Image: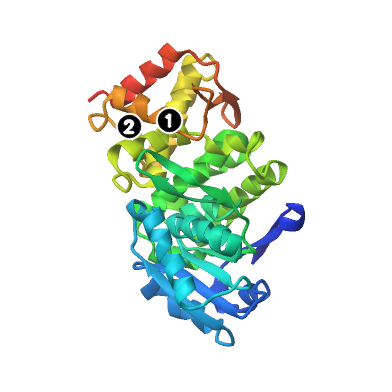
Amino acid sequence: MKTLNLDLGENSYPIYIGQALLDQAQLLTDHIHGKQVMIVTNTTVAPLYLQQVKSLLNSLNVAEVVLPDGEQYKTLDTVNLIFDALLENRFDRSCTLIALGGGVVGDMTGFAAASYQRGVDFIQIPTTLLSQVDSSVGGKTGVNHPLGKNMIGSFHQPNCVVIDVDTLDTLDDRQFSAGLAEVIKYGLLGNVSFLEFLQNNIESLISREKSLIIQAVYQSCTDKADIVAEDELESGKRALLNFGHTFGHAIENTLGYGVFLHGEAISVGMLMATKLSQMSGDLSEGEVSQVKDLLEKSNLPVSVAGKISASEFLSAMSVDKKVVDGNIRLILMRKLGESYISDTYEQAQLEQVIGDFCQP
C-alpha cells in the first residue's frame, strides 16, 4: 500500500492506494469519529461492494442509501434522497458519510456532507479510475444544473480516501478509458516525465497491468495533491486542473449528461485546448499529433463531429465556472507538460477550433 498525505493544515488527510484495501477495516474506522455511518452508493456498485464495506463496520450503526447510476442523476433531487435517509435514520452531527462509487456518487455524497446540519464528516472510496485519480481528491463537491455542470456545490474535504485498485476489475472498458483521460491530463498540464511514462506504457495500461495502474494512480494523486495543497479553494494554480474541462463541460451540457462520459468529453476538450495552443504559437503540429495519438491509443474520442453545432458549443462554454467578467478563461499549454491560464487568446482562433471539431 502507498500512502499520500494531502497537506491542508487542519483539513489534511491521507490517501491510501493499493490492492485488497477493502479488507482492511482500520483504514476506515481510524477516520470515523462517531457511531453513525451512512454508506452512499448506486445501483451498479451496491451489488459488488456494499456488503463488503458494511462488514468492515459491524460495530457501528450503519445505514445505506442506493442512488440511481448515471451523470444525469447528479442533481439536487438525487441529493435529497441522501438527506431523506439521514433524517429518517435520525443521524446527528457526529455521523460520517461514506461515498462508495464513482465521481457522481463522490460529488453528491460530499455535497450532502457539506450541507447536512451545516457540515459532517465523509470518506471517499472511489471505485472508478476517473474518480480515483481526480474527483475523490481535493474536496470539490456538487451537482449539475440543466444550464451548467457542477454549478452548485462547495469545497468539503474528506477524512480520508481509500483507493482499492482491485475495484477496477469490475469496471468496463469504456469507463476505464474515460478514467485514463484524467490520468493523461496530469502529464499534459505539468509533468512531462509522467507524460513520457504514459506514452511508453499505454498499451500495458489498457490491458490493465496492475502494477502500472497503481503507479499511474499514485502519480496522478501526487500531482493533484501538490496543486491542491498550494491552492485549496481554486483561487489560482488549482485552476490548471481544469485543462480541457471548459470545452469538455460544454460537450456534456450540450449533448446531455451521460451521452459522452465525463472522461470522453475531457479527451476531446484536451485536444481542442492543445490545438488552440498550437494556433496561439506555442505547440507544433507534431506535438498536437502526439496528444491525439495517445488519446486514440487510450480508446478515447477526439472530436464531436456532427454531434454539436459550433454555435451551440460556444454558447455552452459561456456558462461555466471559469468565466470571469464575461471572459472565458482557458487552460492552454506553452509546451507539453507546461500549462498556463489564459484569457488573452484570439477569439477568432477559438471559434475556428470549435468549428473544426464540430464540423461533420
Furthest-right residue in view? 9
Task: Name the one closer to the observer, 197 or 357.
Answer: 357
Q: Residue at x 33, y 46 (%)?
A: 257
First-in-chain label (1 vs 2) = 1
| Residue hosting label 1 | 271
Q: Is residue 45 visible?
A: no
Q: Amino acid at mark 2?
A: Ser
Give the quadrant of residue 333: top right
- Residue 115 in the image: x percent, y percent? 55, 58
Quarter of the figure with the N terminus:
bottom right
Q: What kind of element bears circle 1?
A: helix
- Residue 37 in the image: x percent, y percent? 55, 76
Label 1 environment density (alpha carbons within 10 Å; few <14, some 14–19, many ≥20):
many
| Residue hosting label 2 | 303
Residue 14 in the image: above or below residue 35: above
Residue 249, numbered circle = none
Q: Residue at x 56, y 49 (%)?
A: 154
Q: Amino acid at mark 1?
A: Leu
Q: CA distance from mark 1 to mark 2?
A: 8 Å
